[in-house]
Image: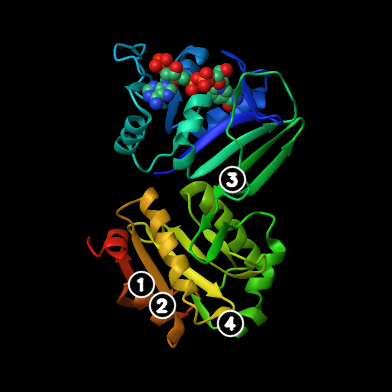
Amino acid sequence: MQVVAIAAVASNGVIGDGRDIPWHLPEDFARFKRVTTGHVLLMGRATFEAIGRPLPGRTTIVITRQTDWQPPRVEDEATRVYVATSVEQSLQMADEIDREKICWVAGGGEIYRQTWHRLTGLDLTEVHQTPEGTVHLPPVDPGQWREITREHNDGFDFVRHAPITHTDRLVLEPVSQRDDEAWHGLHSEWEMHRTGLRSGYTDVHPEVDLQTNVDSWIQHGLGCWLVREANDSRWIGTGGLRQQLDGPLPYWNLFFQLDKSVQGRGYAVELSRAGFSRLAELDPTAEVRAYLMPGDRAGTQVVERLGLYRMADHVDKWGNPHMVYSRSVPWLLNGVG
Ligand SMILES: NC(=O)c1ccc[n+]([C@@H]2O[C@H](COP(=O)([O-])OP(=O)(O)OC[C@H]3O[C@@H](n4cnc5c(N)ncnc54)[C@H](OP(=O)(O)O)[C@@H]3O)[C@@H](O)[C@H]2O)c1
């Protein structure tokens, strides 16, 4: 399940002052309503009472230590309020309500702090003000979060962050809207021919592919990473998992493309395994597939080492033949399922 914090935060980290939010931004409220409607909201009792009513069209889980706290009665089918007595219980409830929905963590300060390590995304409205206030958002550590989109507005920006993954030897950074240059460099025709280790790439134009991956992070909580070695700032490839909805059931497409200079070090396996662990948090029973070109010996070795098995051959809509490898996430991580 995706667990995404949504907050409006001032330049000094302030998000509130006791009961109130120290600014009034109708565009931010409108966007909050648009993105959260139909999904699940998680909030502390103080924030729920500051809002003063259940938000329509959403399921709200209110977190309180008071075992006798009663939510208000709601008649509307699409609007529900549940109570959880711990953060852990609230996350379990959200998962049971519907794992496909986004669990939006809507504050306040205490709840952001306690869910921070569980978040799969940050959706922030950066307010260009420095008001007085007693409630703060935890700092957004640039070593842990990468900004993937930014929409400028008058006096505030809408900013989305996705988590950076660190493996033993690699840093995996979610691809961002601003990565055109790096993306083109890594996906140019020349590079395609030069690169030995690749799988699952499509013939889609690079710009479209970049935006598709940014959207995948936002909509599904996982997409393509830019890959670098832990002690080096140079990009050495791309890879990741992206949800595909082109069949009767959704599956996650594994792909990787690494520079020839780093081949033979086991990086494709390392980044793929990091992807499976991330995917398990979003969808513990997900199916992973890899589409390999016939003759892609290096790619075949990688997917077989990961434990995927060849289930079929396939010709895509451009007429390219592929070998299709598949396996479930529980099997890939634990050898069961
Ligand atoms: N700018 C924004 O985007 C934004 C968003 C939301 C809120 N805010 C602001 O943030 C402020 C409220 O934040 P806050 O930190 O004071 O309060 P809060 O996080 O909204 O709620 C705190 C309450 O949650 C419950 N709680 C916290 N941890 C718990 C746990 N582990 N188990 C069970 N219950 C737990 C407790 O309720 P009980 O006391 O009932 O036990 C606690 O008093 C307000 O100023 C609000 O306007 C701003």
Give the amino acid type for the residue marked by disc 3 in the picture: His
In the picture, which quadrant includes the N terminus? Answer: top left
| Amino acid type, callout 2 | Val
- Disc on the earlier residue, 4 or 1: 4
Q: Which mark is residue 161?
A: 3
Does mark 1 have its CB less than 8 Å from ligand 1? Answer: no
Mark 3 or mark 4: name the one nearer the start of the chain. 3
Q: Quadrant of residue 175?
A: bottom right
Identify the element where label 1 is drawn: helix
Q: Secondary structure at mark 3?
A: strand
| Residue 325 percent location from the top left of the image | 35, 73
Furthest-right residue in this view: 154
Q: Are marks 4 and 1 in contact (CB under 8 Å)?
A: no
| Residue type for callout 4 | Lys
Q: Amino acid at mark 1?
A: Leu
Q: Look at 70% across and 18% down and name the residue there.
A: 132
Q: Position of residue 5 (x, y in %)?
A: 52, 35
Q: Are marks 2 and 1 in contact (CB under 8 Å)?
A: yes
